[in-house]
Amino acid sequence: MDQDAPARDAFRLDDRVAVVTGAGRGIGAATAIELARAGANVVIAARSADQLAKVAAEIEAAGRRALAVPGDLSDLGLAAALPDRAVEAFGRLDIVVNNVGSATIRPFTALTPDDLVDAFRFNVGIAHAVTGSAVPHLLDAPASGGAVVNITSTVGRVGGRGWLAYGTAKGALAQYTRLAARDLAPRVRVNAVTPGAVATAVLEPVLADDAMRDRLERATPMRRVGVPGDIAAAVRYLASPAASYVTGKVFEIDGGIDAPNVDFGMPDV
């Protein structure tokens, strides 16, 4: 056995506390449940109280505790209050997962300045509001330190028609990750996960069309669509002591693509 390899329990999060935004469904829900299965208590936030109730039930079925906070996190005051809610409920905060975001898919000629402002507010502003409020608590985390994981997107690094606002904002979130990691090292680690095409609500129109789905899968080296659990597993690693020497990195969990694999059929201008 390699004595330098991380111990199996290095991937555990027993008794730690996490905040996960956008946790009502998809990647956020899968991540919250995965962290609970690793041993964490989780504060989950999203617009839909009904969706959060289902995720909370899964967390509790894993033997952990959940605090559901329904609301629109574009209210940056509500977003910034989540870390304090975690400490009030569970006595500490160790992990922040900034998953909430908003995807605007629109031709360049239909894109307004307000669309760009909204994209940055949802995809960068909320992440900063939560992280900024969390840092004082994360600095009190145990010796292994606090961890922030941002969820970006593959369209933040590759081209693709219709993604200008969303992709630009997600690209900014990736750079935010690198810069925040420098500012907060060594006591708080900041990393990001970049999902490729994952079976979530954003891709429902593509996945419902057999021909479009086939093109997507053939353009992906792994020849399949990702699932939320693929992303949740990467988040668990980055949040755990197993990643204690990792900060400022953007992990591409995208089936191996280096070019766009989704085409919404935007016409030439």
Image (cartoon, grey):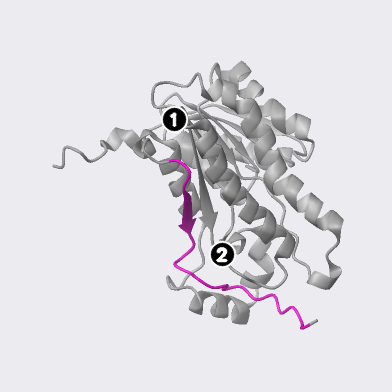
Q: Is residue 261 magenta?
A: yes
Q: Is residue 117 above or below residue 60?
A: below
Residue designated by label 1: 186
Q: Is residue 176 left or right of residue 266?
A: left
Image position, residue 37 (x, y; %): 44, 37
Q: Quadrant of the C terminus?
A: bottom right
User: CA gap, disc 1 to disc 2?
Assistant: 33 Å
Say which residue appears at 64% left-offset and 30% top-offset: 132
Of residues 215 and 5, the one nearer the viewer is 5
Give residue 20's mark.
none
Q: Is residue 77 above or below residue 220?
A: above
Residue designated by label 2: 197
- Residue kind at label 1, given as amino acid type: Pro
Q: Secondary structure at mark 1?
A: loop
From this viewpoint, is residue 58 visible?
no
Q: Is residue 231 magenta?
A: no
Q: Secondary structure at mark 2?
A: loop
- Choose the circle earlier in sequence order: 1 or 2: 1
What crowding class fits label 1: few (fewer than 14 Cα within 10 Å), some (14-19), or many (20 or more)? some
Q: Is residue 227 left or right of residue 267?
A: left
Q: Quadrant of the N terminus?
A: top left
Residue span colored magenta = 247-268
Say which residue appears at 51% left-offset and 50% top-offset: 193
Q: Is residue 128 left or right of residue 74?
A: left
Image position, residue 46 (x, y; %): 70, 40
Say which residue appears at 61% left-offset and 23% top-offset: 86
Quarter assignment of residue 53:
top right
Image position, residue 57 (x, y; %): 58, 35
From this viewpoint, is residue 73 visible?
yes
